[in-house]
Amino acid sequence: MSENECLIHAPVEAVFAILTDGWTYAGWVVGASRVRDVEAGFPQPGHSIHHSVGVWPLVIDDSTSSEQYEPNRFLQLNVRAWPTGEGQVEFVATEQDGGCHLTMRETAVKGPVTLIPAAVLDPILRARNNETLRRLKLLAEKQVR
């Protein structure tokens, strides 16, 4: 399992406003190229973001579904990018120094990506998720300026 953390100088509520607005997904998730639709009810469990992954002309349409959600504290997603596979991503937020300490965990759960040894996959996920959190941080901190 890959784990990343960051301190965002914005309230937890501002960070979760971005995490739970499916239309912002392609703006902060590395690899997501566009959002095609967000189901009414997202981020409640069972509701999805329909997005595309990749760079044209190699674009794959897929989805990310909410599995668990506790407002302003926890969000667990099932992220799909077939034919590579699926992952489970968790965001855990706590208030720290007037901002948001955010932990992001990701693990491969289905498909060919699960055949890659953790010693190889985790550093790749860690690097990608570091950039994902950097983008999220920029968006959240810009909103509170």
Image (tube, grey):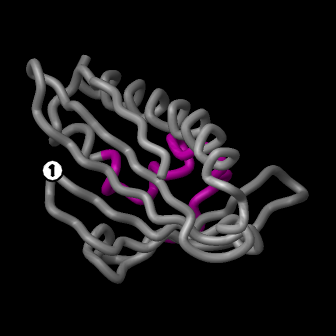
> Relative to 105, is 38 above or below?
below
Depth check: 112 or 100 in front? 112
- Three-letter code for the amino acid on which mark 1 is drawn: Asn
Depth check: 46 or 121 in front? 121
* Secondary structure found at label 1: loop
Depth check: 89 or 49 in front? 89
Residue pictured at 67% horizontal, 71% vertical: 85
As drawn, which residue projects farthest toward the right?
A: 57
> Relative to 87, is 12 above or below?
above
Residue 100 in the image, given as x and y percentages of width and height: 20, 31
Residue position marked by numbered label 1 in the rendering: 72
Task: Specify whether residue 33 is painted magenta.
Answer: yes
Local crowd size for mark 1, using a 10 Å CA cut-off: few (<14), some (14–19), many (≥20): many
Residue pictured at 41% horizontal, 24% vertical: 138
As drawn, which residue projects farthest toward the bottom?
A: 46
Number of numbered tags placed on the structure image? 1
Residue pictured at 65% horizontal, 67% vertical: 114
Q: In which image quadrant can residue 128 be found?
A: top right
> Relative to 54, is 82 above or below?
below
Residue 88 in the image, given as x and y percentages of width and height: 46, 65
Residue 122 in the image, given as x and y percentages of width and height: 59, 45
Chain part drawn in magenta: 18-37
Q: In which image quadrant can residue 68 be found?
A: bottom left
Task: Specify whether residue 49 is painted magenta.
Answer: no
Residue pictured at 53% horizontal, 42% vertical: 27
